[in-house]
Amino acid sequence: MANIVKLKRSGNANAAPVANSLEHGELAINYADGILFYKDASNTVISFNITDAIANSNLDTDVADLEVSVAMQTF
């Protein structure tokens, strides 16, 4: 049976997490804007615009067809 992984998330345009709301390496997503966030080792929230990244690449698949596997281990 598959495990469901839920990210911290917001559907409000221009919303971004603050550093104290994320653990180091924890992911958050703003699905209104298509922006993915994580907190790095220097306590800075880093963002990636995934909507633009997908639109500007030559992917042969839709986002709905992507599958993510999560290993339960720390590296």
Image (tube, rainbow, N blue to C red):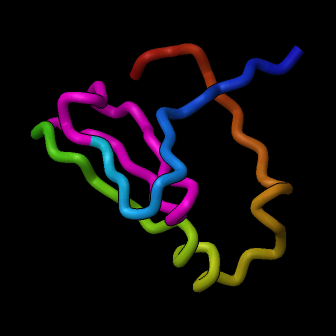
Q: Along the horizontal axis of the image, is 7 left or right of 54? A: left
Residue 14 position (above or below residue 23): below
Q: Position of residue 32 (x, y in %)?
A: 55, 60
| Residue drawn at the location 70% of the way across and 40% of the way down | 68
Q: Along the horizontal axis of the image, is 22 left or right of 71? A: left
- Residue span colored magenta: 18-41
Residue 25 position (above or below residue 57): above
Q: Position of residue 60 (x, y in %)?
A: 82, 75
Residue 63 position (above or below residue 6): below
| Residue drawn at the location 85% of the way across and 56% of the way down | 65
Q: Position of residue 17 (x, y in %)?
A: 30, 43
Q: Along the horizontal axis of the image, is 66 left or right of 48? A: right
Q: How many marks can you see? A: 0
Q: Quadrant of residue 4?
A: top right
User: Looking at the image, which residue sits at the far front?
Assistant: 12
Query: Who is closer to the viewer here, 68 or 26?
Result: 26
Task: Check if residue 75 falls in the magenta segment.
Answer: no
Query: Who is closer to the viewer here, 45 or 59?
Result: 45
User: Looking at the image, which residue sits at the far right?
Assistant: 1
Query: Who is closer to the viewer here, 49 or 21?
Result: 21
Q: Quadrant of residue 27?
A: top left
Q: Position of residue 14 (x, y in %)?
A: 37, 62
Q: Quadrant of residue 49?
A: bottom left
Query: In which quadrant will I find the N terminus?
Result: top right
